[in-house]
Image (tube, rainbow, N blue to C red):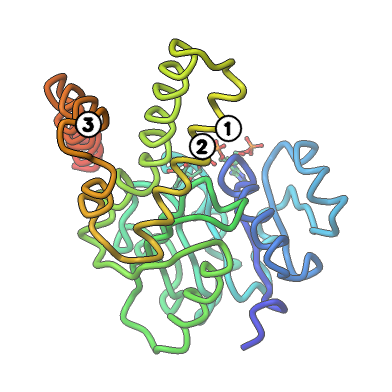
Amino acid sequence: MDISQIKIGIIGGGNLGKAVAEGFLKAGIEASGMVVSRRRVHLLEDLRAKGVRIEKDNLQAVVDREVIILAVKPYQAEDLLTELRPALKPGQILVSLMTGFTMKELASLVPEGVLIFRVMPNTAVALQESMTLISAPECEAPTQQVVSELFETLGKVIFINEELMSAATVLGACGIAFALRFIRAAIQGGVEIGFGADVAQQIVAQTVKGATELILQTGRHPEQEIDKVTTPKGITISGLNEMEHQGFSSALIRGLLVSFNKLNNKNN
Ligand SMILES: NC(=O)c1ccc[n+]([C@@H]2O[C@H](COP(=O)([O-])OP(=O)(O)OC[C@H]3O[C@@H](n4cnc5c(N)ncnc54)[C@H](OP(=O)(O)O)[C@@H]3O)[C@@H](O)[C@H]2O)c1
């Protein structure tokens, strides 16, 4: 299938839905094949200017679509799917980006034969640098291939069992905020030791990007790369050890667990 010609309907053009549409456009998916809906459509004028169809009427946004992407808040989903139900047809692919809404719950709200996927991207979709986790239903490989190829245009894709979706949400989607808080703290330190905030930000952002590429491109464990920078009795190991004495790794792991437990409590 030529993914650039795919007919997509995005329901809920908010922060994530709009970023996904922008990522698809950057990836070369035809604007004329895309429809985005929300109630306050005036907030989608920039997408309209790029050739994307904008709809206030959700039913019009799902008719004839091969893939429908749900990007509303979870508490809005039940009403929305009740509204969409008459327009959904067996064989259509329904991709839910919503946190904490299971495939079983979604299946109970749509006609039989609609192929439901849960997909957890992060806000780097707009730059095609998302880490996107996908849970697939039991369906034919070509259908899974369509969803995989579609989200590969927005970054990296890994298929996971649905039980891991909460963990994926915390590590991949909340993870953007966790990584940015590290970056912010490093900038603050950089200012204290002599740089203006703008230069400190450039240094930190490029350094983090370099560190990321070192492990992405080599597949090596982070500690192997750390070993290369830590001279015995040197300055790097002293700084690192002080951070650990202050609970650096522990704070991060505990933060992840708090988010994970809170998400699971919400879902239960
Ligand atoms: N942000 C993230 O990093 C992230 C990452 C992964 C997953 N998610 C999930 O993505 C979903 C969206 O998150 P978000 O941050 O993009 O929220 P958001 O900015 O509030 O976007 C939701 C959009 O849905 C629209 N909407 C609400 N009811 C609607 C309806 N009946 N028909 C059509 N559009 C409707 C709203 O626009 P109007 O009010 O104009 O209708 C709003 O723009 C959530 O379920 C979240 O769990 C978010």
Callout 2 touching callout 3 (CB < 8 Å): no
User: Picture coordinates of residue 209 (x, y %)?
Assistant: 48, 46
CA distance separating discs 2 and 3:
24 Å
Q: Residue at x 68, y 69 (%)?
A: 63
User: Picture coordinates of residue 152 (x, y %)?
Assistant: 52, 69
**Nearest the camera: 37 or 83?**
37
Reply above or below: 135 against 127. Answer: below
User: Picture coordinates of residue 80 (x, y %)?
Assistant: 53, 49
Judged left or right of residue 49, residue 268 is left
Furthest residue toward top: 192
Q: Label 1, on which residue?
A: 202
Residue 177 visible to an observer of this rendering? yes
CA distance separating discs 1 and 2:
5 Å
Callout 1 touching callout 2 (CB < 8 Å): yes
Q: Label 3, on which residue?
A: 234
**Nearest the camera: 26 or 245?**
245
